[in-house]
Amino acid sequence: MPNKQESQSGDAAASDAAEKIAAATAEENANKEE
């Protein structure tokens, strides 16, 4: 079942990337308010 394992790895990477994007967006919004 290597495909299933790859899918889980991809989901984890996508989740990590989404968290980084959300953090960057929040930081940008905070900078705009200043």
Image: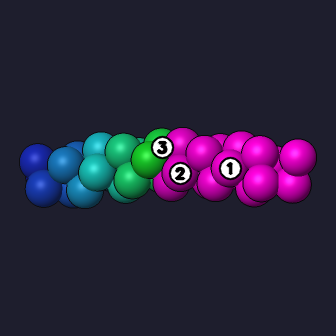
Q: Amino acid at mark 2?
A: Ile
Q: Position of residue 11 (x, y in %)?
A: 37, 55
**Within-10-Å neighbours for mark 2: few <14, some 14–19, many 20+:** few
User: Residue 30: x, y in percent?
Assistant: 81, 48
Q: Which residue is mark 2?
A: 21
Q: Which residues are magenta?
A: 18-34
- Marking on residue 28: 1
Q: Which residue is mark 3?
A: 16
Residue 29 at what x, y percent from top left?
75, 56
Q: Front-most of 3 and 25?
A: 25
Residue 25 relative to residue 14: left or right: right
Left or right side of 28 for 30: right
Predominant secondary structure, magenta span: helix
> Going from the N terminus, do you reach mark 1 or mark 3 first?
3
Q: Residue drawn at (64%, 54%), measured in percent from left and top?
A: 25
In reply to whether residue 1 is colored magenta, the answer given is no
Could you tell which of marks 2 and 3 lies nearer the N-terminus? 3
Residue 13 in sight in this render: yes
